[in-house]
Amino acid sequence: MEPKPEDVCIEDIAHALSMLCRYNGHCRIFYSVAEHSIHVQSIMARTPIGKWDRQLQLAALLHDASEAYLADVPSPVKPYLIGYKEAEAKVMAAVHQAFGLEDPRNSEPFIKRIDTRIRANEAELLMPVESDPWHKVFGNPYALTIMCYEPAKAETLFLEAAGALLDGREHKEFPDVP
């Protein structure tokens, strides 16, 4: 598998991620990877390191872009799929090259922190069974509202965020984030 930057298309990413349900569909209600990605970007925009760095915000928005081409595989399963991590890394490298971003390994630690902590918000609202409080596992939830948008709305919002970041325009906060 040799993905090429010229084969990467923001519209394809937005559409596919808006149609993919987080957690491989194990939610009480449909919640798209696109909406999740917008939340990660929005939180990144509020951090001291990401506030003025549109490239880092764009990397945050695109952090799950490989799922548009490979599908969403739950994190606990990935280590058991021989070759998946390598394929994912190749796709992410092509995505980053396509949009003029640095090597994904440079931004990954910052984005991973947000991506992990946001699970507290998602689990509280979306998971069907409650065991221990989710913040004990993932940290305190962020101040954000998860709307569980229909795919068409999530796709539109994703494209608006990507367009603003790619054009160097100010991107207004995700509409439902306080």
Image (cartoon, grey):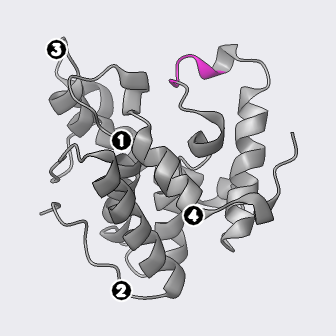
Q: Is residue 73 left or right of residue 139?
A: right
Picture layout, residue 78 above or below residue 7:
above
Nearest to N terminus: mark 1 or mark 4? 4
Question: Do the residues bearing badges 1 and 4 touch, measured as CB atoms within 8 Å?
Answer: no
Structural distance between the alpha carbons of marks 3 and 2: 39 Å
Query: Disc 1 marks which residue?
Result: 32
Tell me the quarter of the image containing the N terminus: top right
Q: Amino acid at mark 2?
A: Glu
Q: Position of residue 19 (x, y in %)?
A: 42, 41
Crowding at dot 3, Cα within 10 Å, few <14 / some 14-19 / many 20+, comes out as few
Q: Earlier in the sequence, mark 4 or mark 2?
A: 4
| Furthest residue in direction right, as rendered | 2
Tag nearer the camera, 4 or 2: 4
Distance of label 3 from label 1 (alpha carbons): 21 Å
The answer to whether residue 53 is visible is no
Q: Residue at x 32, y 64 (%)?
A: 42
Mark linked to residue 11: none
- Residue receiving disc 3: 130
Mark number, residue 10: 4
Mark pair 3, 4: CA separation? 36 Å
* Residue position for label 2: 170
Extent of the magenta region = 74-78
